[in-house]
Amino acid sequence: MRLLEVTRDCFYTQHVKRPTRIRENQIPSLLHLILTNEEGMITNIKFNPGLGKSDHLMLEFDILCYAEILEQNIDKRNFLKGNYVSINKELAEHASEDTTNMDANEHWTHLMNILSTSIEKHVPLYKRRSNDIRKPYINKDAISAVKKKHQEWTKYLHCKTDNNYQSYKIARNKATRLLRLSQRSYEKSIAENIKDSPKLFWNYVRSKTKTKSTITRVNNPNGDLTETDKETAEVMNDSFVSVFVEDGNTNLPPLPRRNITSPLIDFEITEEIVLKALSKQKPNKSPGPDGIHPKLLLETKDIIVKPLTSLFKKSIEESVVPK
């Protein structure tokens, strides 16, 4: 009964639903449990015969888990520490350049070359090592306390005295207290700012889960599990096609005609509109495919607003989106 209460209090999932001990002239019983804190961690449970003369069944199952794999020495730009005074000076030198003879693609390439050069000069690099899997809530005080704990433990191993062990216990308890305090403070700040930064909240929630609700492997027509994502997609597509039924009517339904009272014949982009959009950039977001960080756009908005406005106007006039 105590085990059942603990299982319920911790929200554990018990995956074994059939008896695991079968003996002649006795009622089968369920003795072997598989408890996890997430329902999707265990799949494909098989109840195999026991070893030798044992009346206990052998359980075979798949564990679905994920490991964080970080690339070695990833070089990234730290836009939060960029020298935007120098970047604005360089951009101001190019702001008066004549770009009337450039089309949208040429204008975009020219602007990107200027920005890329300034980024390389004035935005520092930082490296994320493969062994750096620090939790986001661990602050500097907690890191110092953990280092102190390791130092005291090393000191105790070198000289096992009561005083050294007491010093280690004090450092250990302090590190534990600061880690828990930093985690509570971090979670409280996320909860308070959930309306302004919902992405940060859901990233933290996902970091706490060990399984993901995704399709990994399925059985192909031969009964074997698929090995690649492409093969899985093909099996899923074939299954969908086999059950999809057409009604035989290939004619598209008629679309109602719209009566346009005020057609859009003139669309004006002004510097005020572009500046307003630049001012709404969130500096804690990641850059898009072009590699331009929102922090850079926000810090250089007063200088970059003119070339961006010209670029957007050309894009509308030429009906072209730069490649």
Image (tube, rainbow, N blue to C red):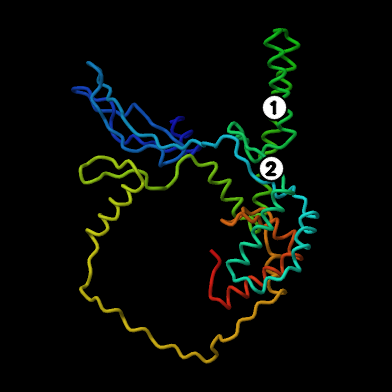
Numbered disc in front, either 1 or 2: 2
Answer above or below: position of 126 versus 264: above
Label 1 to label 2, Cα distance in Å? 27 Å
Quadrant in the picture for residue 141: top right
Q: Where is residue 52 in the image (x, y as percent from the top left)?
A: 23, 16
Observer-nearest residue: 287 or 45? 287
Q: In which quarter of the image is the N terminus?
A: top left
Mark linked to residue 125: 2
Q: What residue type is labelled 2?
A: Leu
Q: Where is residue 75 in the image (x, y as percent from the top left)?
A: 63, 41
For label 1, the crowd category at 10 Å Cα-Cα, with few meaning under 14, some 14 to 19 and many 20 or more, is many
In the structure shown, which secondary structural element does the residue marked by tag 2 occupy? strand
Q: Name the residue under label 1.
A: 146
Q: In this view, does 81 lie to the left or right of 311?
A: right
Quadrant in the picture for residue 242: bottom left
Residue furthest front in the image = 101
